[in-house]
């Protein structure tokens, strides 16, 4: 399905009219809608809206496409490239307890991404022999962020309770003033918002070339591994949407026998759902038919398990010289900050986690230093004025803080000792 990048710029002029016709219907039961309609991804609808609002975006994407095609055409570009480890910050926006996904599910989701993008997923063996030679891993891996934008330690997970019961594709979930949570710098992190999407949506993503303030991926909370959105609960929604974030199109090109800008994926008539039987021939695409087991189709999670070599090259191009996401190669967001060396008094802060009160003592003498000043910061580096330290008792009151990870700076005049604690 190979075409020049100029086709992308021309096609951008018609995106809004093409994709607005596929706007989501209003069905009260989102889960029932999922099961009835199958996988629903709104990445192309979001792209159409962004291009309509920002005419210059088409030019930026055309430039990205030119760099991508040049990279793909280079005989040495895809050889020996180092692995790029992308720090991920997960913004969990929840209205109910069920939507506040456990940390283990988030860890499992990162694991799924790493396996799928490195071709180490156990179901890679299911790829038909006709396509097995095309299946490919990428140079991309993922890790939960360990350092926030201010250089402070972080778990890579932000939890925020919201009054919003469900979210749409208007990017409000990415805006703290609209009940969501602001993006971390797009040049250093992959922002992944986990929330309750309405209208039967499983997720959407922003392609390279869009605004940094909305850059990232949004997925339905119940699509994470072990979630309730069966048959879309193995984490492959994130795999699919991160593919868009890494500049992949739907494999059918979002048109009848369309173009996905990749040369080694067979042309296919439209999206596939469920688990088709091989071969499924459309668009006169030969004996092998559709590559419906590709992550960029719409099949069930259990029935998608490969990227092609052409898709891998397209994603890897983003991290080469001049690539749209090359700044991520030098991000330190995945590296924990060094702890402050303790040259004098060693302090102890307990209990940790804490719900109301923390006790500060000199761990060396088991005594209390009444001359210290104590400040508490959140993961964004903001001072938490609601936390108060009483030097007379050596107690730090944290009862008014929201649940999450915080940093404590202890200054006794000769040194500053930093410690972290979890408010539960």
Image (spheres, helix red, strand yellow):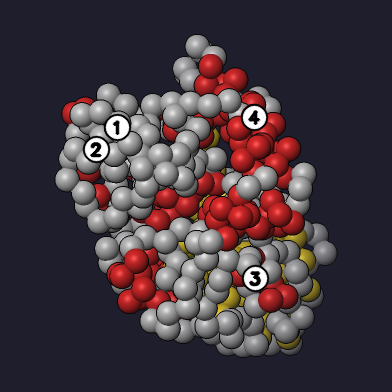
The reply, left or right, for residue 364 in relation to residue 95 is right
Q: Residue extending furthest top?
A: 75
Secondary element at tag 1 = loop
Per the image, the residue denoted by label 1 is 284
Between 137 and 393, the residue placed more toward the observer is: 137
Give the answer, above or below, for where 42 lies relative to 83: below
Q: Position of residue 238 (x, y in %)?
A: 43, 54
Measure the alpha-carbon separation of dots 3 and 1.
42 Å
Lower position in the chain sequence, tag 2 or tag 4: 4
Per the image, the residue denoted by label 4 is 6
Give the answer, above or below, for where 47 lies relative to 28: above
Q: Is residue 256 visible?
A: yes
Residue at (23%, 31%) from the top-left corner? 288
Residue at (63%, 47%) from the top-left corner? 14
Secondary element at tag 3 = helix
The reply, left or right, for residue 416 in relation to residue 139 is right
Give the answer, above or below, for where 211 lies relative to 267: below
The label nearer to you, 3 versus 4, is: 4
Q: Position of residue 345 (x, y in %)?
A: 68, 62
The reply, left or right, for residue 389 in relation to residue 293 is right
Measure the alpha-carbon separation of dots 2 and 3.
40 Å
Per the image, the residue denoted by label 3 is 172
Lower position in the chain sequence, tag 1 or tag 4: 4
Per the image, the residue denoted by label 2 is 281
Label 4 Cα neighbours within 10 Å, binned few <14 / some 14-19 / many ≥20: few
Give the answer, above or below, for where 341 lies relative to 62: below
Residue at (38%, 26%) from the top-left corner? 264
Lower position in the chain sequence, tag 3 or tag 1: 3
Q: Please tell me in which quadrant of the rendered image residue 374 appears.
A: bottom right
Q: In what quadrant of the picture does the N terminus appear?
A: top left
């Amino acid at each position: 399905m190979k075409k020049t990048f100029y086709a992308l710029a021309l096609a951008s002029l018609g995106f809004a009219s093409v994709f607005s016709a596929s706007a989501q219907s209003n069905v009260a039961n989102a889960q029932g809608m999922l099961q009835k309609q199958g996988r629903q991804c709104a990445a192309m609808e979001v792209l159409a809206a962004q291009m309509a609002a920002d005419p210059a975006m088409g030019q930026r994407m055309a430039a990205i496409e030119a760099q991508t095609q040049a990279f793909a055409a280079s005989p040495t570009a895809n050889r020996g490239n180092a692995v790029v480890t992308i720090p991920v910050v997960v913004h969990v926006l929840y209205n109910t307890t069920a939507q506040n996904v456990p940390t283990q599910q988030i860890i499992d989701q990162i694991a799924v991404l790493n396996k799928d993008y490195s071709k180490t997923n156990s179901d890679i063996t299911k790829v038909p022999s006709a396509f097995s030679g095309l299946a490919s891993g990428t140079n991309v891996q993922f890790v939960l962020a360990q350092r926030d934008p201010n250089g402070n330690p972080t778990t890579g997970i932000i939890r925020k309770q919201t009054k919003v019961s469900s979210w749409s594709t208007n990017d409000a979930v990415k805006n703290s003033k609209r009940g969501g949570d602001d993006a971390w710098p797009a040049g250093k992190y992959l922002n992944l918002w986990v929330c309750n999407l309405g209208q039967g949506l499983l997720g959407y993503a922003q392609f390279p070339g869009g605004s940094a303030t909305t850059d990232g991926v949004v997925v339905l909370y119940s699509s994470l591994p072990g979630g309730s959105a069966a048959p879309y609960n193995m984490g492959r929604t994130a795999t699919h949407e991160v593919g868009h974030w890494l500049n992949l199109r739907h494999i059918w090109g979002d048109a009848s026998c369309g173009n996905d800008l990749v040369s080694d994926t067979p042309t296919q008539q439209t999206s596939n759902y469920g688990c088709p039987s091989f071969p499924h021939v459309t668009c006169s695409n030969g004996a092998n038919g559709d590559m419906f087991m590709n992550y960029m189709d719409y099949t069930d999670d259990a029935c998608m398990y490969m990227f092609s070599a052409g898709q891998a090259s397209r994603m890897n191009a983003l991290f080469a010289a001049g690539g749209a996401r090359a700044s991520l190669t030098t991000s330190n967001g995945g590296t924990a900050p060094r702890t402050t060396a303790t040259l004098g008094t060693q302090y102890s802060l307990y209990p940790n986690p804490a719900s109301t009160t923390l006790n500060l003592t000199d761990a060396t003498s088991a005594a209390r230093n009444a001359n210290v000043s104590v400040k508490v910061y959140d993961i964004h580096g903001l001072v938490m004025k609601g936390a108060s330290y009483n030097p007379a008792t050596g107690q730090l009151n944290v009862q008014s803080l929201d649940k999450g990870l915080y940093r404590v700076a202890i200054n006794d005049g000769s040194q500053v000792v930093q410690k972290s604690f979890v408010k539960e």
